[in-house]
Each structure stands twice: as C-alpha cells, then as structure tokens.
Image (cartoon, rainbow, N blue to C red):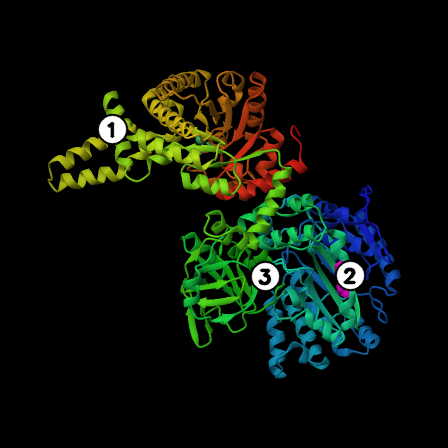
Amino acid sequence: MAKKVAVKKKAKGKYVYFFGGGKADGNRTMKELLGGKGSGLAEMTNAGLPVPPGFTISTEACTLYYREGRKVPASVDKQMLDNLAKLEKAAGASLGDVKNPLLVSVRSGAKFSMPGMMDTILNLGLNDKTVEGLKSLTSNGRFAYDSYRRFIQMFGNVVLEIPKDVFEKEFEAVKAQRKVHLDTDLNEEALRDVVKRYKGVVRKRSGRDFPQDPLEQLRGARDAVFRSWNNARAIEYRRIYEIPDSIGTAVNVQLMVFGNTGDRSATGVGFTRNPATGAKEFYGEFLVNAQGEDVVAGIRTPQPISELEKVMPKAYKQLRDITTRLEKHYKDVQDFEFTIQDDRLFMLQTRNGKRTGYAAVVIATDLVDEKLITPKDAVLQVDPESVSQLLAPVFEPKAWKALPVATKGLPASPGAASGQVVFTADDAVEWSRQGKAVILVRRETVPDDIHGMFVAQGILTATGGMTSHAAVVGRQMGKPSIVGAGALEIDESGRMFRVNGRTVREGEHVSFDGLSGEVKIGQVATTPSEILKVVAGEMKANQSPLYQRFEKLLAWADKFRRLGIRANADQPDQAETAYAFGARGIGLCRTEHMFFGEGRIPIVQRMILADNEADRRKALDELLPLQRGDFYGVFKAMHGTPVTIRTIDPPLHEFLPKREELMVEVATMETKGETGRELDEKRALLRRVEALHEFNPMLGHRGVRLGITYPEITEMQTRAIIEAACQLAKEGVKVVPEIMIPLVGLVKELRDQKAVVVRVADAVMKEQGVKVKYLVGTMIEVPRGSVTADEIALEAEFFSFGTNDLTQLTFGFSRDDVGKFLSVYQDKKILDKDPFATIDTTGVGQLVSMGVQKGRSARADLKVGICGEHGGDPSSIHFFEKAGLDYVSASPYRIPVARLAAAQAALQVKVGD
Ligand code: PEP
Ligand code: MG
C-alpha cells in the first residue's frame, strides 16, 4: 500500500467518482466529499484489494438535491449514467439485461458514520425477468428468488415507505404455512410465493405495481438515500453527536457480490481489535448463506469470526492478511465488512472503528507500544470524553456477588448498569424525565430507538451479535450494553420478560455488567472505578493496569499541551482529587460553598440578619477560624501550586430559608393562635428575607457589590486566606494565594476591594511576622468588564473569565430559566448548541478575546484563565487555546478530559487563529 496519500483536489462540476479495476477517482483524503464509506472503498481499490467496482455520488450532489427542492439535477444524473456504463463494462453485465443482469447495492455514507440511521438497498436491478436470468446464470433458483424478495422488501420500505413489518408478516405467514423455522429453510417455490405476496403488498400500499425498470429503480433508490439524510432518527443522531445537518450523505452504487448463494458463501463484519475492551484480538462475526443486513440487523445471532477459519480457511486467512494491512495503513483499528461469494472474498468497507472509552485508551497505548503510532498520534486519536468514561462507577463487589446470575449475554459495552426495566424507547425517555434510572430491554434495538438508548443506564437485548445495532450504538455512547442474551423471552407488548422461570415486569430492577455479560435481577450498589480508587489512594497504581494506561496517555498529553490545567474546588478533599488527576492549581475556590459546611449556616445567617456592623463582625469573627481552616487545607492539598480564592459571590438570600416556605410557616402559626419567641423569630427572619428579596437575584446584590456594601466580609475572607498562608509559610510549605473579586464591571469596584484586601493582608503579615506573595485579580464575567479590560488590568494582576455569567449576561439569558426555551431554540436551529455548555465563539467568544487583548495591552504579564463550566468542555478548550489563555479550570472529574483536550488543541490550532 502506498505510504503517502496525496490530498486530491475535487474537480469542479464532478459529482460522481468511479472505483474499480485497481484504480479509483477518489482516496482516503476525500471523506468530506465521498463519505467515510466512499473514501474507504476508493482507498482499498487503489491498494489493489478485492473490492467490487462501483461509483460514489458525492455529498455535494446531496446538497444540490436539497437545494433544488429534492431533485437531482440533470447534469448529476448524466454523470451517474456515464459511470453506470463504466461499471457495466467493468462488471461485464448490464442493468436490466435479461441474460446477464447487473445487480448493484445502493448505500448511504456520510463523512461521519451513522450506524443504521440511513438507508441501504441491495440486489437492485432485479425484476420479473432478470430474476430468471440470475437463476439460470447461477443455476440456483432459491438464491435468485431469495435475492428478489429481499430487494422488493428493501425497496418497498426505503423508497416506497411501506413499513417493514407489513413485509415481515407475509414472510412469517409463508414460513408458518410451510412449517419451517429458519429463513434458509424456504425453498425456491416458497420464495416465489413470498415475492408474489410482497408485490401484492406494494400494489396495495403504494397504489402501483413494483417498478420493473431498473433505471427507475436506481434513481428511486438514490433519491431515497438522499432523503434518508433527513429522516427523524438520522436527525436525532446528528443532534446527539453534534454532526452538522449541512454536510449531507454520499450514495455508493456498487456491483453486488452475494453472501447468500449457498454454504460456500457468507457475509460478515469485524474489527481488527475488540472494540469493547480494546484487547488485541481479531474480532467479529459472520453468517453463512446470508446478506449483509442480516448480520447488523440483529435478526439472526451470527457466529464468531474464529469459526470462519474452520469453514472457509482460505478466505479467512486472506481476510486476516488484508485487515492487518489495513490497520497498519490507517494506523488505527479497522471496522470492516466483507462478503464471501462461493469461497471468494470481497471487501465492502473499512473505516476507523468506533470503540468504548475503555477500549480507546487500551488501543491507543497498545498501538504506541507496538510502534504503529507515536505518542502524539495516540493523544490525537482518543476522544477526550473517553477518559471520563473510565471514571464511571463499577458494582460494589460484595453486593454484586450476593445476587445469582439470571443469564449471560454478549458483553457489548463495559460498565455497571442498574435500573428499572422499560420496554420501549419512549418509556425510557418518559421515565428518565421523572428522574428514574432505566434499563432499556428490547428483543433487538432498531435505529428508531436512539432517543431511548441515549437516556437509559444500560441496554439489554435478547438477539443480535457484537456488531448488532444495540452493540454498535451502545459502545459509541459509552453506555453499558449486553446483547444476544438469548435466554430472555421478551414480551414487549405485555411489558415483561421471562428468564429461567422468573418473570420480570416493567418497573422492576435489573442490573448487569457490560464487561462480563452477566445479568442479575435486582438493584445493586455501585462503587468508584479502579482509577478513582488509585486517585483516592485506596489502591496502588501498580495494581491497576487500567490506571497505568490512563496515566500514560495523559502524561503524553501533558507534553504537548500549552494551556495550564487548574481545578474548580472548594474543599481540601476535592483539591486532593484534582491534584491527583493532574490539576496544577485551583482556578476557582467558591468560598460561599464553604458556608454550607456543617454547623456554619446558623453563623452565616446571623451575619446576614445582623442589622448593624458590630453584630455582623461578631458573626464574621466566628466564621474566620473555620474559613482559615478550609484555606489551610486547600493550600496544603495543592502542593505550592497557585490557588485562586474568590470572595463571596451569591446573593445573600441563598443562605436563608425560602421566602414562600417562611410565609406559610408564619401564617400557620398565626392561624393556630400561637405566640411567643419562636413566632417572633420567624417573623423577624421573614422581614429580613423580604428585605433581601430580589426580582432578578442573578443581576442583583451579589459579587463585588456585596463586598462594597459589606467590606467586613472581604476583610474576614482576606484575613482567613492570609492567616492560613502565613501559617503554612511558617511550616515551610509553599503557598501562592490569588485573591479574586467577582462580577467586576468597573475598575473602581476593583480598586475599592483591592484596597480592603491589601490593607488587611499587610496587617496580617505584620501581625504574623511573615511575608507571603499574593496576587489580587478579578473575574471577567460581565460584558463591561471585557470591554474595559484595559482599565481593569491596571488594578488586576490576573483575570479569570467567568464564562457562566458572561454567557448569561451577553445573551441576556437567565442561567436559571434558560431550560424553559433552550430546547425550542435548538429544535428550530436558532442555536446549535447549549451556550452554557459549549462556548458561543462568535458572541461570548469575542468578549473573551477582546478581554485578553485589552487586558494584556495594559499589563503585558497579565495571567489569564477561565473558570466557567466551559473550562472542561473539549471544543471550548480549542477556542481558549486560540484565544491565548494561560490556563483552563475545570471541576475535578473533568481534569483528565481537559488535559487531553488541551493537548489536542495545542496540536490542532494556534494561538491567534
Ligand atoms: C462564572 O460565572 O463563570 C463562574 C465561574 O462563576 P459562578 O458560576 O460561580 O457564577
Ligand atoms: Mg460567575
């Protein structure tokens, strides 16, 4: 195989790309234009692999189809016919030729694989006459009619939009009539009967006869594939995986090869490594005498690929050789499809395989050990979200062992899943909306179940193999999944299943382990993952190979990243976890969270209820040692790395009981005629709560505004910080405190608070006789702060972007209420993504960039970070890399994701882009 692939430029006005006879118009670099499948077929053809010839109608043609009001332009149709002629020549057969008919498959294939979401049609070109031609060519009437009935069913369903089960019913009726169990037991005559019935279905449902003209069939199939880009499940899939709607799908038209000509034929799919665990083993499954869709559809449970070695050793060896070469060529695990027709192997697809987070880490580290890829490739190969999957809980071993195994299925995607059984995707969505954890139990999943699979804790199916829909999608979602648990007798309409004599009804609990395949009835408690145990010091790193791989990958990532990684943590234990995960600094310590600690709320309330400064100071004096203790712990846990501590931010009413509840309590006591101290206290509390009540608390008396009105709070907090720092300095421990003032929009606000901080810090250091270096900075989280960042930087020694508030205030969307309309905005495509999860680069992002640039123009060495939720979001991290920030700060469990995403950002984009 060629080592280097030149990036081919797409030719203007070219919409159809041929592949065949060892040469293809496209190659692997053209995924965008030809889709993953099309570019893979081109690449394999160029490499001389046995690929049936065909052509790819590009994604640009799909865009044109939609632009022209769902019509393929004549020029594209003409190119298709020209390529069809080429294909006929290469195949030595013609479309519609009664004696020697060309039969093709028509398949979708977008840039990103969307398993089962779009449509496929096989055996196109068959009609009442060519089926006879096929029969005499192959001397196999059973095969010819089996192919024809499949074609009518697929065409009827995909092009004419007749539900699948209408065909299934007819098929089952013929099977019942002939008293056969397996599809393969139907003989030619029975299949002719099926064809007749199917044609009747088409006539009845579509009002016309099944089209006999193969060109009409081809155009219909092509357009239906384009149409399927916008079916409900494909749209839902793209929403989940954030695939743009605009990119469209390609259509691949390819000479049919048949896995259903008899016992010397087969079809299958596989992976060069185990996509669930990452183990280096040839992995996959196949069905003898079957067509492609049978394997993935989960209707028949296929045989493991190792059996192929026994039944068709030559084809097996060739398949292993080819796929090993493909893995080396693409430098990644390959997910392939093949068909064996009368002992001859054909490759139908190859692409980088989707894998679980667990497998992703195992595979990437193995490929580096095998010298197939470099550490840099490994860092780029693993989706940052994968590493967070490794932190998911596992079953508590004792509780798990205590329950008997109800059955075992195929372990399709690892992880512990426990929840209430539901039998439909809609129920899964409804129940989880009610806050219930659900396990979606299905005979087999279909692409339409995607929304239910997404919300379920786990997916459990009775049929299908490791490459069935449920397995593929479950793995991709990182969702624990078991498939092919054949002992389950599922009665979906009765909402129950039976297993080994037990009946389990909807709502009962089931638990399963997606790594071992064991299913148990009942609820089982979970415990932290191995990685968390190592991080918490409960397990040694050298006892956990998984942890070692995880850390190896992240250590490579650290070599490539420019951005520093800090954590948002308020408690010493959180800080320890964050440090163990690799955070080197705290980017945001929300001091108010400490006010909720045990026994503290009454003191905080006393401080708030005080109606004079002296009483307020009394309460603050009580809080001082507690806060000092917290800061001491956090500083110590961070081993001399910088710790940014923010002064109090939220509106004070958050620390008081709810106004409405108090009103009810007071009214109830009054109606009961109660009097006395308790009622008086409640009334006083209510009066204070009323006084603090705000209509828009998020825009109200909070942040720096609190420190300005109650400077004694800032004083107490500064004192607590600096006293803790002095204490540690005396103990010889390095500390780097950074005191941060929130919600600043005016330089004078910061100046006011900085004066308080400096005055108290100086006093404390004098009292303690120690000097510690500390910084005073600000959050940039109101738009005015960004716009006047040059002024603010004259006072601030560092900035930290509070992108939560900055998003709220830039959009004018309340953080607390946005949920009410955000989904409508997303459905209507007014917003692609939730701007509170992924930074809005065009709007909020401009304020960030402006803030950085203006801030640094006034103070060249200004340290700039971000501590909003976006700090743990990979695509936002790409933006922060470009904006030239110094660090991102994320919650402790997002630190591994942030480390990897920051490395990818450094390798993929440049500061200033
Ligand atoms: C922010 O606004 O982005 C931020 C980090 O502060 P908080 O979420 O506490 O308002
Ligand atoms: Mg904020």
Whichever of labels 2 and 3 marks the residue nearer the N terminus, that label is: 2
- 291 lies left or right of 88: left
Residue depicted at x 45% and y 51%: 538
Indicate the position of residue 326 as horizontal and vertical percent values: 76, 56
Q: Nearer the viewer, residue 562 or 284?
A: 562
The residue wearing badge 3 is 471
Per the picture, the main secondary structure of the magenta-coloured stretch is: helix
- Per the image, label 2 sits on a secondary structure element best described as helix
- Disc 1, ligand 1: is the CB inside 8 Å? no
Q: Quadrant of the C terminus?
A: top right
Does dot 1 land on a helix, a strand or a loop?
Answer: helix
On residue 770, the disc is: none
Query: Which portion, as a residue range, is magenta?
Result: 319-324
- Which residue is situated farthest in the bottom direction here? 179
Query: Which label number is shown at residue 322?
Result: 2
Q: CA distance from mark 2 to mark 3?
A: 25 Å
Residue 612 seen from this side: no
Q: Is residue 538 visible?
A: yes
- Residue 210 in the image: state x and y as whole percent: 71, 67
Please identify, in this view, whether the residue under mark 1 or under mark 2 is nearer the observer.
2
Q: Name the amino acid, label 1.
A: Leu
Residue carrying label 1: 609
Q: Amino acid at mark 3?
A: Ala
Query: x, y (%) of residue 442?
Result: 52, 65
